[in-house]
Amino acid sequence: MGVAGMVLLAACASESVVVGIGDTDLDRADVLEWIEARGGIAAVGEVTVDAKVAAEVISELVTYEALIDLLAEHGTVASDADVAKASDKLVAAGFDASSSMMGRLSRWQAALDAIDAGVAGVRSAYEANAGLVSHELCTSHILVSTRDDADEVIDLLAAGSDFAELAGQVSQDPGSGSQGGSLGCVPTGAFVPTFERATLGAIAVGMTLVGPVPSQFGQHVIRIDEVRPTEPVTFEDLGSRTVNVLLSIASMTREVSLDGRFGTWDPVVGRVSQPAAPAAG
């Protein structure tokens, strides 16, 4: 792997803010410690880490801290007792009680527990933003293996290539590829969370093409074929979708800033894109 695919994590004294999520600021020490712990890196002095790993870890960090910020805006803040209960739940599930990650993971779990309990602030957070996620998703896509392949597809489309023809030629989804990439119109909840989040993010800002968007199937380039708003689903009817819906709302509504040495926050896709060059920690 070339240096462009690496991030340098240096043990320096600087404590400058690296990530801002709503009203939450995280300094270098916070972020580096989390990358080291969550990414499984034993950092001594200076280390390098796959930039993709750093981007994935920071994406998770932003998403869940955004959820906590959203719930706090609507009056739901975990008490010490809530966090302790969440910590016990994590330990019972096999997490190491002595891990440096436990404090943050316990706060995240407490937020998820509040969602499961349907407390008033959770309902308020959804109802105040339900319009963002109230759409049928009318899309086409081109599925490829790697981010580089998706970037190439985007470049070809920008140069004038026909989306349907390109889908038929290169998409690794044979079902939609034979239909020019069309996935039709489906209700929210039908697609994997990363695909749905990026589609809703594009609709929110009026974009018609978004990508690359990762999923377990590969990398997607998504075209918005029609904007079709629907009546919001009631909070009670969200069911098992509630957590993913609140996570999407949180990452769509929080202001996020990120030190460019660690990547770029993409508010449409709702993820961190890795830096093009190595980042000095």
Image: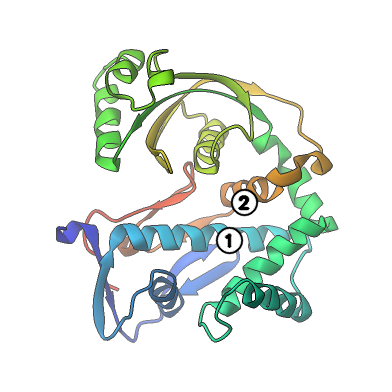
Res. 120 in view: yes
Residue at the location (30% across, 74% down)?
A: 281
> In what element is the residue under mark 2?
helix
278 lies above or below 133: below
Nearer the observer, 229 or 138: 138
Mark on residue 247? 2
Q: Provide the secondary structure element on which disc 1 rests.
A: helix
What residue is drawn where x is 62% and y is 51%?
247
Q: Using the image, determine if residue 236 lies above or below residue 207.
A: below
- For residue 7, which quarter of the picture? bottom left
Q: Is residue 254 left or right of residue 35?
A: right
In the picture shown, does residue 53 fall above or below 206? below
Q: In the image, is residue 130 above or below residue 274?
A: above
Determine crowd level at label 2: few under 14, some 14-19, many 20+ residues with C-alpha closer than 10 A: many
Q: Position of residue 161 (x, y in %)?
A: 27, 17
Residue at 61% x, 24% y is: 186
**Residue 72 seen by the camera:** no
Kind of residue at disc 1? Tyr
Sooner in the amino-acid sequence: mark 2 or mark 1: 1
Quarter of the image with the N terminus in it: bottom left
In x, y percent, where is residue 124?
80, 51
The residue indicated by pointer 1 is 64
